[in-house]
Amino acid sequence: MSAAVDLVGYDEAVRRYDPVIGIEVHVELGTRTKMFCAAEVEFGGEPNTQTTPVSLGLPGALPVVNGKAVESAIKIGLALNCQIAESCRFARKNYFYPDVPKNFQTSQYDEPIAFDGYLDVELDDGEIFRVEIERAHMEEDAGKNTHVGGSGGRIHGAAYSLVDYNRAGIPLVEIVTRPIEGAGARAPEVARAYVRALRDIFRALDVSEARMERGNVRADVNLSLRATPDAPLGTRTETKNVNSFRSVERAVRYEVSRQAAVLDGAGTVIQETRHWHEDTGITTSGRVKSDAEDYRYFPEPDLVPVAPSRAWVEEIRASLPEMPADRRRRLQGEWGYADAEMRDVVNAGAVEIIEATVAAGSSAAGARKWWMGELARKAKTDELELADLPVTPEQIAQLQGLVDSGRINDKLARQALEGVLAGEGDPEQVVVARGLEVVSDDGPLLEAIDAALVAQPDLVEKIKGGNMGPVGAIIGAVMKATRGQADAGRVRELVMERLG
């Protein structure tokens, strides 16, 4: 890893320079077989067990286009408001890497399947920012290198390297933006929001699992700085394979600060690829960035052009599901959330999980209370996503149902939730096992009230004299005596009856 470099503070950097970003997002399609052959696709298989002569690039092996992948690419293009090509073709992108067994990647170059689109993304404060899409094209993935014996799994210092070709040939769609201008200081936020919006669309279309931690979605983040918004574009760097929303934002911020320092020192920003380091939050130099001509693109001679009929494209368009942004607006209306409440839910990635909780029988208010309160705090403490917590929407709906029925109050419900998270069972089981139900029998309550009144005669005199302030202390004593299992409202009624 390169030595640490001096940085310009982010706020200072964007005060003096205008950042321009560009994002290339690769999504692995969830097809059963690879892009050009019948090799099965399965995550986590034994190395080099999901291959065919085609995916290994053996002489004489001829590719055949995966029709399901073409359909998925058209869905993505339509969802991004793109035009769909009446005819497009594949090309050979020539370069040598050990994880590309053919020594070229079958991709699309000058004739992508989808082009000239846009995506409106919502920022944290509700502002809508339009990102122009240049193209979305089909290609195949490379294999995976594993470097053994080095530091952090990198090739530098490794004793040897292993190659797994299971991933080689998996269908990809790459979505390329036009230069994203006008974001200013919000460029990192725009980048994060855009990648998240894409991930949500992939899931809504059911074209990919879109799990970033598995590499189903990977972002290459381009960034350049210029002196003013009307100046020519600066030299860009491309930070490769960033695979979380947080890292996309951090990578943009870091490159802004780093490039500003280079320019301040009268240096030259090098057009290169860079590696993102999640642990340290920095980028380091990879290789000088190749231009298109360096790849010697030429039409793939073994594949005929892809020419989707207009009727097929319109059939696919008619089958598209509700898009995530439209769905969020509909759900907000159904749930009765204020704009700020819905933004918090969206930013927490909790839309689907709250929707599932409501579908399981919870009120919308109750679902938001638990997922955005106790569970959000738990997820933050444990550094987990909400969906990764050991509790289901059905369990939260059951928990809220116990509160709504009066069997437990919110305080007892929090204890029941602790039990669920600890693996003690469903809320009903935890409530029974821990004896958490609200005391609804007036007999035990009156006993606790009488004990509290006897123990605090001075407070009793004040209450009888017309000072209602001490009533809270009496109720508190009863709640403590009943381990919080009393209904505070009923306790107050009984206290006032006892005192006349």
Image (spheres, grey):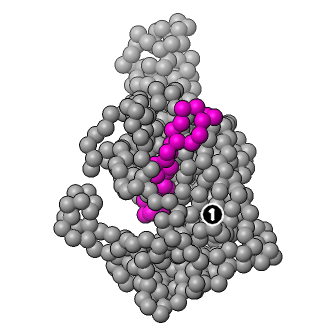
Figure quadrant of residue 144: bottom left
Vertical placement of residue 425 versus 249, above or below: below
Q: Can residue 361 be seen in this view?
A: no
Tag 1's secondary structure? strand
Note whether residue 251 is visible: yes
Residue 339 coordinates in the image, percent (x, y): 67, 37
The quadrant in which the C terminus is found is: top right
Residue shown at the point (47%, 93%) measured from the top left: 60
Relative depth, front residue between 136 and 202: 136
Q: Is 51 in front, or is 155?
A: 155
Q: Residue at x 54, y 79 (%)?
A: 35
In-image side of 192 versus 9 (left or right): right
Please name the residue that numbered disc 1 is placed on: 136
Figure check: 172 above or below 377: below
Image vertical order of residue 37 relative to residue 9, above or below = below
Q: Give the range drawn in magenta.
A: 210-238
For residue 83, which quarter of the picture? bottom right
- Which residue type carries mark 1? Ala
